[in-house]
Image: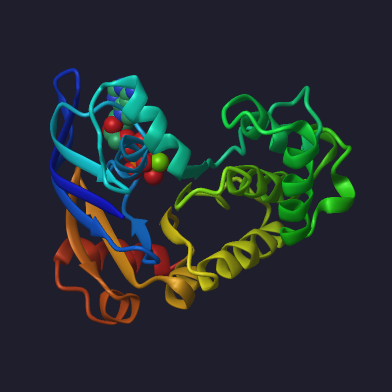
Amino acid sequence: MITINRLNKWYGDFHVLRDIDLEVAKGERIVICGPSGSGKSTLIRCINHLERHQQGDITVGGVHMTNDIKRIEQIRRNVGMVFQHFNLFPHLTVLENCCLSPIWVQKKPRREAEKTAMEYLERVRIANQAQKYPGQLSGGQQQRVAIARALCMHPQVMLFDEPTSALDPEMIKEVLDVMIELAREGMTMLCVTHEMGFAKTVADRVIFMDEGQIVESAPPQELFNNPQSPRTKEFLSQILGH
Ligand SMILES: Nc1ncnc2c1ncn2[C@@H]1O[C@H](COP(=O)(O)OP(=O)(O)OP(=O)(O)O)[C@@H](O)[C@H]1O
Ligand SMILES: [Mg+2]
């Protein structure tokens, strides 16, 4: 589903991603962890061209990424993204947020877009809030709307960038439960998160990044119980120590 070969990216002089190689199979669930500033967000943002890379190749769903807008749009149609701070449009209702791209990008009739949106809102257990504005919802509810909104485009891959790290503890579970369900249904997922319980429950592989590199990649049990690199060991001892 995703192939990344020798990906390198710089912000000015700063070499943020170094020789990243990554293959993600259809249905595979990957958790990415690592210290702040290690390049996790930059890596997943390169996958839907929210960031432009300078060297290497990215292919998503058989489409090779170039700077050609047609290809970028083709890839973005296949890739849903959920951000730490939800990024919902505050002046649109929950339902309107979910219908915007299907109507304007996919040219769906409003009726059909609304029907699909209600189905996904139902699935994330928030259909009863469809007429509210994001500001009237809790953080956990807003994040579930953001997930439903991404799903309305029927993506083949979902990217999550720390989807629970801006949430109060009691709301983290309701968002993780939705993500676990999605994983069980076979969605291909790349998720930047430090929720190690989630990683153990659903991840096929956990990737540890440091200083722009993939330092280690292994199934969760293996990576958590028997990390190979001293950098991974140190990082895990810090986050598991809390
Ligand atoms: N637009 C930008 N311009 C310049 N430098 C940037 C830009 N975005 C990120 N960086 C730098 O690139 C590095 C990697 O950033 P990135 O956001 O990918 O890290 P991260 O692993 O997601 O960190 P965090 O866990 O804090 O979210 C950081 O040193 C950051 O300061
Ligand atoms: Mg980040």
Vertical placement of 1 versus 27: above or below? above
Colouring of the image: rainbow
Figure label count: 0
What residue is at 49 percent from the left and 73 percent from the top?
197
Left or right: 70 as drawn, with respect to 93: left
Question: Which of 28 and 89 lies nearest the eye of the viewer?
Answer: 28
Residue 134: tell me if it is visible. no
Residue 109 in view: yes
- Please tell me in which quadrant of the rendered image residue 29 appears: bottom left
Name the residue located 70 percent from the left edge and 46 percent from the top edge: 145
Q: Quadrant of ligand 1?
A: top left
| Position of residue 218 in the picture relative to residue 49 (left or right) | left
Decide: is 207 above or below 89. below
Q: Quadrant of residue 113?
A: top right
Q: Position of residue 90 (x, y in %)?
A: 74, 26
Apparent side of residue 170 relative to residue 71 in the rendered image (left or right): right
Residue 92 at x, y = what percent?
78, 26
List x then y, in percent, for residue 195: 49, 63
The residue positioned 34% from the left and 56% from the top of the image is 32
Is 203 or 49 nearer to us in this picture?
Answer: 49
- Quadrant in which the N terminus appears: bottom left
Q: Does residue 232 lie above or below 212 as drawn?
A: below
Q: How far across and down, in percent of the image, does residue 19 sit? A: 10, 44
**Residue at the extreme top:** 12
Residue drawn at (35%, 24%), measured in percent from left and top?
70
